[in-house]
Every structure is written in structure tokens, then in C-alpha cells.
Image: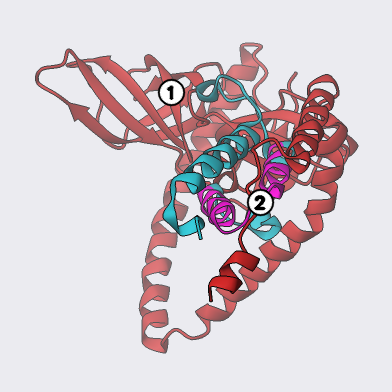
Amino acid sequence: MSNYLLHHKEKKEGLFTKAFVVVLLVVVIIVVIRILFPNTFTSSLQSVSSPFWKAKNSSVEGVVNSSQLLRSKRSLIFENDNLKTKIEETEFKLLEFNFLSQENDSLKELLGRKTFDKDDAVLGAVLARPNVSPYDTFIIDIGKNSGIQKGDSVFVQGDVFIGKISEVNKNTSTAVLFSSPGEITQVSIGLQNISANAKGRGGGNFIVELPRGTEVEKGDVVTMPGIDTKLFAVVEEIEANPSSPFTTILFKNPVNMNDIKWVQVVKTP
Amino acid sequence: MLGSILFLSWWVTAIVAIGFLFKFRAYEIILWGIFADVLYGASVPSFYNIEFLFTIGAIVFFILSYFLKKKLMFYDI
């Protein structure tokens, strides 16, 4: 036993071994190249990783779809009835919404203000979602080949503004979300359009501090200021501490960032 | 590690990396760190716009594990 231990005793090595120095040198070279030419490695690495992400996304979808087959008939009938009722209610609301939206657009055009044109949007499939990195970024499958540029706006479900393109490669792009930790975005809260600076907290969550007594309620809609009313988030929680002169308002994007499959990229005018 | 970086949450990758560091003298952790940063890196205000969080984290953990292993009886056979 003692011979075994003596035989297998690890050689005491210092921290700066040859291997460690070589690794550090490689890292320094890559960091310098990335700072000087930001897209050099990212473009090729994202191209190589794309097939893996696509395969993972389609296999996850397959598993989720097949798990639906195992549900009982009764629960499916119950859910079907509920959904039918909801569809009828939503269709009615949608008619009114479409009418008001068209009226809004035509009034803006009449006054010479061009509104956000959804026909300019380019559809992109999400390859990697925010939870894989602490940077809160999306990687999408469209890049320079689709005319995407740095700073273009990223939407989901047509009207929800979630972020901006931060890096464009040949076939892929990286989008940074407004909810990235520490990112400050100017927003309007509720029907009274209370102006505030929303601070990102990651994963589609935001925080705002307003003076105590400001009229904000749970469920209030948060929008981006401007001529086009772009849906930004919905107020989820209001925290008021009697000893503090401020009220903390927590809100989040109305869509789950980890479920997004497609995004629309709108070119910046 | 590659699968973890590509498909799993970043904190799972961090746990796997720390596990590797305590089992082996895993220099490659630092290379995986730079791989993740090149793939996902973006300038984020809360991180002082540093785009190399995984790399810095990997180097720090590598050095910490070196000194911690010296103190632990488990590695001093």
C-alpha cells in the first residue's frame, strides 16, 4: 500500500508550469485578436455551432410534441373547450384592436408621421437563448447575408421590443436584450406614461424606482417612448417600504425568453 | 464541456468546470472559457462591459483550486 502511494505520489509542481503558460499565451493572443478584429473567431465558431443548436432545438421540439401524445383524452377535451372559449373572446377583442390600430396608423400617416413598418422585418430563428450565457444574449440564424446591421431592433410576436443587434457575422448575429444586467432603457409606464429608466436584471426582467405614491398598478403596460407604441413589458410586482421614499417596481417582458423560437429584426432607419 | 457550453445554462457549465478543476489539473478549462466568451460575449454594463467573463472566471478558479488543493488533506497523499 505504502509503495503504491509512493509510486503514485503527484509531483509537486508550481503554478506556472509550461502548460499553464502556453494556455495563458493562447488566451492572450485570442483576446487581443478579438479586441482588434471582433468578428474573426465569433463568425466561424457560431457557424460551426449552428448545426448543433439546430439539431438540439428540433430534438427538444420532437420530445415536447411526443410527450403531448401521452396526455389523457379527458384533459385534452377539457383544455380544448377552454381554449375554444378563449379564442372566441380573443377574436372579438382582436377585431376591436385591429380597427383601432388601423385608425391609429392612418391618423399618423395623415399627420405625416411614418410608423414602424412590419414588412421591413426579417424573420430569424433563435439558435441559442439567453440562459446559456450570463450576458443575456440571443444568437440568431441571420446575419450580413440578410442585410442585418449592428443596432437593428429585435422584436418578438410582432410588437414586443426586446433588444438590439450587437454583433453581425456572415450567417449569424448576436442580439443583446434590454434586460441584460445593468442595461438602462427609457420607458413609459401605464396609461399616464410615467417616464422612468428601467434597469435590466437578466432573463427579461427589469427594475425601476419611482417616488412613493406614483400611481402604478400590477398589470400596467410598459412601453417604449416614441411615436410608435412598442410594447416593452408588464408590471409584475410593486414593492413599497414605508421607511423608503421610493417604490420599487418590477416588470418583465410579456414573453418567456426561454421559449422564443423566432424573432423579427427591423432595420434601423 | 462542449455540450454544456452549447446547450446548458451557464451556471451548469460553471459547476462542471469547478468539478473538473478539483478532479484534474484541468488547464483546458481556461480554453473552454475563451471559447464560451468568443461564442456569446457581449458588452454588458453590469459587468463593466467586459466580454471575457468565462475566461477571467476560469483563470481565477484555476488559481484558487491550485492553492486550495495544497491546503486540502485529500490531495496530500
Residue at the farthest front position: A3
Regarding residue A268, the answer to whether it shows in the image is: yes
Residue A136 in sight in this render: no
**What amino acid is found at the position of numbered circle 1 in the picture?**
Lys
Q: Amino acid at mark 2?
A: Ala
Supply the letter of whichever chain is cyan: B
The vertical placement of A262 against A79, above or below, is: above
* Number of numbered labels in the structure image: 2
Q: Callout 2: residue from which chain?
A: B
| Most foreground residue, A259 or A91 | A259
Residue B18 on the magenta span: yes
Is residue B47 found inside the magenta-colored segment of the image? no
Disc 1 target residue: A199
Q: Which chain is red?
A: A
Q: Which mark is residue B26?
A: 2
Chain containing the residue with disc 1: A
In the picture, the disc for residue A119 is: none
* First to last magenta residue range: B11-37
Quarter occupied by the N terminus of chain B? bottom right
Q: Is residue A180 left or right of residue A34?
A: left
Closest to the observer, A85 or A25: A25
